[in-house]
Image (tube, rainbow, N blue to C red):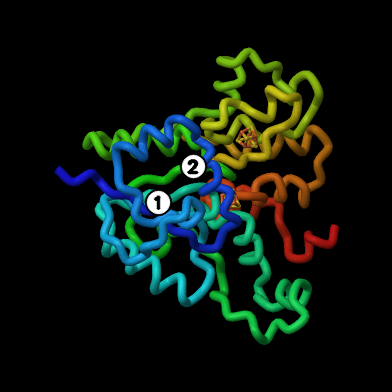
Amino acid sequence: MAKPSIAVHKFSSCDGCQLAFLNAGEDLLTLAGLVDISHFLEAGMDDEEAEVDIAFIEGSVSTPEEVERIHKVREKSRFLVTLGACATAGGLQALRNLDESNEDWKRAIYARPEFIRTLDHAEPIRAHVRVDFELWGCPVNGRQVLAAVRQLLFGVAPVDTRDKVCMECKRQQAVCVMVTQGMPCMGPVTRTGCGALCPRFGRDCYACFGPAENPNTAALARRLEGLGLPPADVARRFLFINSQAPAFHAQALAHYRPGFADE
Ligand code: SF4
Ligand code: SF4
């Protein structure tokens, strides 16, 4: 019997999520024995046109070429899973969506901006095609990726871990950095998946795993203001990596005003 097949496709991204997948260690070797990996450039497999059971997508849709490509990938895949913050919520590059002129950022970065061919906005994959499951994080947790592969291959809906980083801090017995050190931690509204990595090392969470289930973003924004953050900084906390996640975007806009990047 033919083994199930998977592919990992790169769109606008830094490759960090592909590397997190590769760094899953022995679990990845076990997986390699269970599936055929048709396309995974960071691992040396190159067959972008292959029809597969599961396609993982890293990166946002940011160019006209990527719009065409994501539709082709969707047609050739039974399940489509986004891999990380760029693919799931636009990623860091979606911060340019806040530049209404869509020109200032090009002039700020490129010597010859007229050569840049890009969409007006960097968008998550779900803005273009149906997505079967979303994996969050910047980067993703490799073990979560492998667990999703196993569950899909066994015909089970992958478990969506949506409770908050705060819950994980309690499980890991990590001391709360907001309560004890007054840090502007995003853990109360951020989904876990990282094992509360940052608070365990004494720093505040910056929300790289995106919104948790039922995030009370308004209450956290008031708390951040109470810790002394000006409105522009409160907006930045919500906009940073997952700016296109609706819950974070809406709360950021309550504090954001054009030109805040200069404050
Ligand atoms: S989510 Fe983060 S680590 Fe993954 S591709 Fe995007 S920027 Fe890189
Ligand atoms: S604690 Fe927050 S910022 Fe740190 S890895 Fe986890 S989700 Fe990301």
Q: Quadrant of residue 33?
A: top left
Compared with 177, 111 (above or below) is below
Q: Quadrant of the N terminus?
A: top left
User: Which residue corresponds to mark 1?
Assistant: 56
Where does the image place residue 189, in percent across and percent down from the top left?
A: 58, 35
Cβ–Cβ under 8 Å for marks 1 and 2: yes
Q: Which mark is residue 21?
A: 2
Residue type beneath disc 1: Phe
Q: CA distance from mark 1 to mark 2?
A: 10 Å
Q: Quadrant of the C terminus?
A: bottom right
Mark 2 surroundings within 10 Å by alpha-carbon count, few (fewer than 14), some (14 through 19), many (20 or more): many
Q: Is residue 162 visible?
A: no
Mark found first going from the N terminus, 1 or 2: 2
Q: Is residue 142 visible?
A: yes
Per the image, label 2 sits on a secondary structure element best described as: helix
Where does the image place residue 68, in percent across and percent down from the top left?
A: 39, 74
Q: Residue at x 78, y 19 (%)?
A: 180
Residue type beneath disc 2: Phe
Outermost residue, top side: 173
Instruction: Choose between 52 and 166: the one closer to the eye.
Output: 52
